[in-house]
Amino acid sequence: MDASFGEGIRARIGWLLRASNILILGLFLAVSDGQKLLAARFPHSPWNRALLPLDLLFLIWMLFAFWLWLSTRDFGASSHLSGEDALTFALAVCAGLAVWLAKAPWATGIMGVCFSIAFLGVGLARRRRYYVAATGWCIAGFAVPRFFTWPDLDMQLSALFFLGGIATALQGAWELVRSLRLQRSQPEPDSR
């Protein structure tokens, strides 16, 4: 095995981690919060234990993707936040306020709208259109308080993250296919 083969594998793994980060984030949200909903509704279901290794696998994948993001980012180049970082901070503040105001009946809807705006903003920062995820989070934010009438806010938030995670996974699958098409359409570099 020569060095170029190892560099090719390393580049492909890096591409896969970067291209699938939204898909894996959506699947992680859907599986982990779906597992909470399943455990609350059907506590003795065999699916409760079956989803745990899958949840752990998604978490490990996201840690590798985060490690790759940290290793490729130059933190010393500028001291100001990028658009995506500023949007993530704003989302964290809005989500914290919505959870703090958790007794209000509109907290779940506010969380859905916040995540919808966040996906639109991240899409603008990356020069992509994340309309599927944004629409899914917005619909989930308005549908969960109206159709899932659990008295516990934790269960409503789990339903929100489950439905939003499905929308995010659909957007991530779309982005993965798009990235694969772009990669295949690029010509191979000349190795002369």
Image: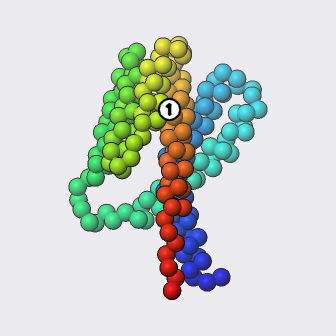
Residue 147 x %, y %: 53, 14
Q: Secondary structure at mark 1?
A: helix
Residue under numbered circle 1: 164
Instruction: Residue at 54% x, 50% y: name it.
Output: 177
**Which one is nearer the viewer's eye here, 154 or 143?**
143
Left/right placement of residue 190 relative to residue 6 reads left
Residue 38 x %, y %: 65, 27
Left/right placement of residue 178 relative to residue 86 reads right
Task: Indicate whether 3 appears above or below 138.
Answer: below
Q: Is residue 132 visible?
A: yes
- Give the residue type at disc 1: Gly
**Which one is nearer the viewer's eye here, 102 or 27?**
27
Instruction: Residue at 75% x, 28% y: name it.
Output: 45
Identify the image quadrant of residue 148.
top right
Residue 90 x %, y %: 30, 39
Identify the image quadrant of residue 73.
bottom left
Task: Indicate whether 74 appears above or below 29.
Answer: below
Instruction: Residue at 48% x, 25% y: name it.
Output: 140
Instruction: Residue at 33% x, 29% y: name it.
Output: 97
Q: Is residue 65 visible?
A: no
